[in-house]
């Protein structure tokens, strides 16, 4: 994925690809793909997920696909984030 903004270009790619191309990056992230099928018009899912992660000081960046949302979290917090989301899912 890529996002062209006035301030610059954001690319979502593997660390290996960035290294091969000599691209700099500020951090590494892991992708957690939500298995719930969500509509692009659904309300509240992103807020619930990011709110749960934020309550535990885990930053989250979301890319919404047509069928699923994909949450990018700092690599060093990925396991904790996954456990939180699994616990959240079991409460519903």
Image (cartoon, grey):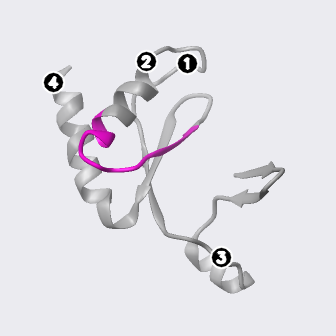
The residues tagged by marks 1 and 3 sit, at their Cα atoms, a distance apart of 31 Å
Q: Which residue is mark 2?
A: 44
Question: Which percent across, then down, holds residue 1?
Answer: 70, 52
For the record, the magenta segment spans 52-63
Read off the residue under disc 1: 39
Q: Residue 61 placed where, x, y %?
A: 50, 46
The label nearer to you, 3 versus 2, is 2
Between disc 1 and disc 4, whose residue precedes?
1
Label 4 element class: helix
Q: Which dot marks residue 26?
A: none
User: Sequence order check: which comes first, mark 3 or mark 4?
Assistant: 3
Residue at the spot of label 4 = 91
Q: Nearer the viewer, mark 1 or mark 2?
A: 2
As measured in the structure, the alpha-carbon distance from the residue carrying label 3 to the one carrying label 4 is 38 Å
Q: Which residue is mark 3?
A: 17
CA–CA distance between discs 4 and 2?
16 Å
Q: Earlier in the sequence, mark 1 or mark 3?
A: 3
Residues tagged 1 and 4 counted as in contact (Cβ below 8 A): no
In percent of width and height, residue 19 lies at: 64, 83
Rendered position, 7 above or below 18: above
Q: Is 55 left or right of 30, judged from the image as shown?
A: left
Q: Could you tell which of marks 4 and 2 lies nearer the N-terminus?
A: 2
Residue at (21, 19) in percent of width and height: 92
Packing grade of label 3 (10 A; few <14, some 14-19, many >=20) is few
Query: Element at badge 1?
Result: loop
């Amino acid at each position: 994925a890529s996002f062209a903004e006035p301030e610059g270009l954001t690319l979502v790619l593997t660390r290996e690809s960035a290294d091969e191309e000599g691209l700099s990056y500020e951090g590494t992230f892991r992708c957690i793909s939500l298995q719930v099928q969500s509509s692009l018009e659904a309300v509240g899912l992103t807020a619930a997920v990011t709110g749960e992660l934020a309550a535990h000081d885990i930053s989250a960046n979301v890319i919404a696909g047509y069928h699923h949302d994909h949450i990018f979290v700092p690599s060093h917090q990925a396991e904790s984030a996954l456990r939180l989301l699994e616990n959240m899912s079991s409460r519903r």
